[in-house]
Image (cartoon, rainbow, N blue to C red):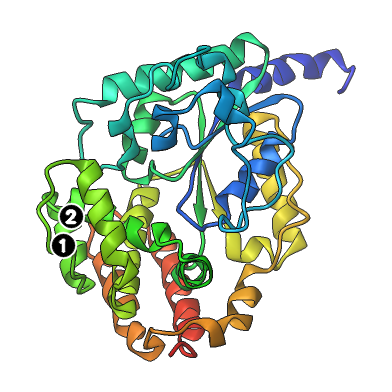
Amino acid sequence: MSHDPASRPAEGSQQSALKQGVFLHTGWRSAGTWIWSRLRALDSVTGFYEPFSNVLADLSLADVSASRPTLTSGHPPLAAPYFEEYRPFLQEGARGVAGYRKRFGTDRFSPVPDAEFPALQAYLANLCERAAGQGSVPVFKFCRSSGRLPWLKRAFPQAMHAAVLRNPASQFASGWLLNQQWSNPFFVAAPFRVLGLNQTEPLVRQAIEICGVSLPPVVAASDDAYAIACEQYARTAEGNNAYRAFVALWILCALRMADGVDLMIDVDRLGQSREYAAGLRAGFQAQTGLSPDFSGARDLVEETRRSAARMVGIDGRSMRAVHSAALKFLKAQSGTDAAFIELIREKMVLANELTEQWR
């Protein structure tokens, strides 16, 4: 820190302008957990994992210690259990994180906040206030927030909203291979569930139709029942349809990112460029005062290339049409930034290359 008196007002102004938290908006299998873990490793951070996860509805103090990565998760080792930071919000002999509601667990894509949002906002505000009261910066890692990103930006303008973007082929392949290897259908089922529970929204219906998605032919009595039906459907889902569903959800989430985030994290570049990793660190430093180390990022694009022979049950060559349709959908939305459209076009070109070898 400079000791030049002339610089002190500017430094004070910069300090007051720093964002007072990080909302990390990610998708399933986007490498968001690893990015979050790099922020969580900082002494000044309280890292809340998946604050919308339905696991939190039944979590108990006794469960916390066991909430660690498993072979079937594909996640990196963590220094502390996933849900360690929720201990102050749990009561001995009871289940459920204070303020959490199970309906938070389904992402929504309506243009205006739903009836649950005031409770959701109060829940997140309570987590933020607890961390801030301890002199810590709250960092949230979401997988169920992208549809609600505009709502959250308006509700929490004091936080930095960062979005994680990974090309759709690599992201889908990560979940598809986990299903093949460990019979874990969650990541294949998730797009069907989110799309199905939001299909009355015109924008979602348009994405479903333009990507040619066939949803599970069920009418469920509840969100939970529909989730179960989607997992059953995913176990025998035709591979091409599963990928189309994934791309439909991916482009909807990308569209929400296009509304404007404070920082875009390109996972594909992160593992390929030390310069980009250093620049990302500087971006966090400038906006939040946090300085996470991303130098250990893996080249996930190359890993997708190496796993191509294991991607069975999908005609990769036919996926070019899906990528093209999704990009066309994005371009048709008014007000979308040209530079962002170009970024998504690059992701689709990369996805064309990666899926070419899938059979």
Q: Secondary structure at mark 2?
A: helix
Tell me the amino acid under the disc marked 1: Gln
Q: Which quadrant holds residue 3?
A: top right
Above or below residue 270? Residue 36 is: above
Looking at the image, which is closer to me, 43 or 162? 43
- At 55% across and 88% down in the image, what residue appears? 309
Q: Which quadrant holds residue 66?
A: top right
254 sits left or right of 16 in the view = left
273 sits left or right of 320 in the view = right
Looking at the image, which is closer to me, 15 or 179? 179
Would you say the residues marked 2 and 1 are in contact, meaning their CB atoms lie under 8 Å apart?
yes
Above or below residue 131? Residue 300 is: below
- At 46% across and 89% down in the image, what residue appears? 356
Around disc 1, counting alpha carbons within 10 Å, would you say few (fewer than 14), some (14 to 19), or many (20 or more)?
some
Quadrant containing the N terminus in the rendered view: top right
Looking at the image, which is closer to me, 78 or 133? 78
Quadrant containing the C terminus in the rendered view: bottom left
- The mark total stands at 2
**Label disc, if present, on residue 206 of the rendered structure:** 1
- At 42% across and 75% down in the image, what residue appears? 348
Tell me the amino acid under the disc marked 2: Leu
Residue 95 in view: yes
Q: Residue furthest right?
A: 3
Where's residue 99, x and y in %? 38, 17
Q: Secondary structure at mark 1?
A: helix
119 sits left or right of 186 in the view = left
List the residue tagged with mark 2: 203
**Residues at marks 2 and 1, CA–CA distance in whole angstroms:** 5 Å
Around disc 2, counting alpha carbons within 10 Å, would you say few (fewer than 14), some (14 to 19), or many (20 or more)?
some
Above or below residue 284? Residue 29 is: below
317 sits left or right of 129 in the view = left
Where's residue 113, x and y in %? 23, 31
